[in-house]
Image: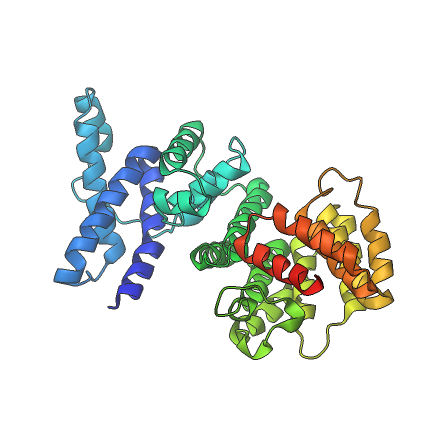
Amino acid sequence: MTAHAFEDLLREITPQVLGALVRRYGQFDGAEDAVQEAVVAAAVQWPAEGVPDNPRGWLMTVASRRLIDRIRSDQARREREEAFRVEQPDIPDTDDTLELLFLCCHPALTPASQMTLTLRAVGGLTTAEIARAFLVPEATMAARISRSKQKIKGSAFAVDVRRLPVVLHVIYLIFNEGYTAVDRVDLAREAIRLARLVHAQLPKDGEVTGLLALMLLTDARRAARVTPSGDLVPLDEQDRSRWDRAMITEGLQLARTSLGAEALGPYQIQAAIAATHADEGPTNWRQVYALYLILERLAPNPMVRLNRAVALAEIDGPAAGLALLATLDDDPRLAGHHRLLSVRAHLLERTGDTAAALRCYREAAKGTANAAERRYLEARAARLR
């Protein structure tokens, strides 16, 4: 087994084992520590002795024993032994990963805590990896994760469909974190894996299907999105031969399926927009504009109007797009935002007002924390000097 396949196997079965232990013993912290010890043991033994026939059962057995040892060392050893004594634990046939995901998205947690706890418990990322992804010290991230686990201690371990919108939002946040960072492909890949997990359990849910379609259609463009030196390439300038056609085919099929659901939600509309961009030939901007109108009614958001302005500019010219952008200037959620400035700069450049475009490009470059995006905006500004 290759090192990559070995890592994928552990990434897949680790949350299953953790979910089973949390369900059985109700101890998030203790179960997670025990599972991590079992994973370390597997990393040492399996390459030397071979992967066992039932790797999930092996991890479950080792982790259960480690957890029981911890329990037995507690002051209330005798009472706890009676409640948790398991010499050869039964290996459950069910996969509790989905329940674990819903637990990590508990409404008592902030969106940031939901995301980090999901990455830690379900995604299998280390605290150090998560800290690097969010640009915070490892100690800070460790404290955040610890507080999150304490907040949900004793919470019900079950799939609560009322929490599904939060789960989908967290998955999408993880994907965006990985996609916009350019070099964090592991986060984007993990978000897609989690979406597939939810979709396997809820295949008829339109929003679940739409979210998976949206992420596949977006991630399919990753290879063409940056130059070899790491500079961003706009969508209309990308080499479409570098797009992942298998992902696009799957995404298009899922997008069509999602639109057949009884209810219509934001992820389904966003998937339809992504599907329009993925079609062969020129983009149908009138269709994109109409979809953004629907999306703005379903989920009013200044970023949606920003994108609608881009589509309008493609239909009626940059002046029309700029007029729509002007309606966002007084919106505190987007006023002065680098995305608004960069779109305005692009449209001003198209009108021939290079001086104003240059100012906007420079301001936008100052306002973004994404290095690749900053280089792109600075390059656009340099062309106008």
Which residue shows up at 47% across the image and 56% down it?
197
Task: Classify residue 18 as left or right of residue 356.
Answer: left
Find residue 220 and report its horizontal and vertical position in percent.
54, 68
Q: Is residue 289 visible?
A: no
Find residue 288 and report its horizontal and vertical position in percent.
76, 64
> Could you say which is closer to the camera, residue 45 or residue 89?
45
Q: Quadrant of the N terminus?
A: bottom left
Which residue shows up at 24% across the image and 29% down it?
83
Q: Quadrant of residue 153?
A: top left
Which residue shows up at 44% across the image and 44% down it?
118
Q: Is residue 183 visible?
A: yes
Q: Quadrant of the C terminus?
A: bottom right
> Could you say which is closer to the camera, residue 74 or residue 348?
348
- From this view, report whether residue 84 is shown above or below residue 340: above
- From this view, report whether residue 288 is shown above or below residue 12: below
> Could you say which is closer to the camera, residue 207 or residue 7?
7
> Could you say which is closer to the camera, residue 66 or residue 181?
181
Find residue 107 and report its horizontal and vertical position in percent.
54, 34
Task: Classify residue 187 as left or right of residue 358.
Answer: left
Q: Quadrant of residue 207?
A: bottom right
Which residue shows up at 45% across the image and 59% down it?
185
Number of disc labels? 0
Task: Classify residue 199 as left or right of residue 66.
Answer: right
- The outermost residue toward the front is 385
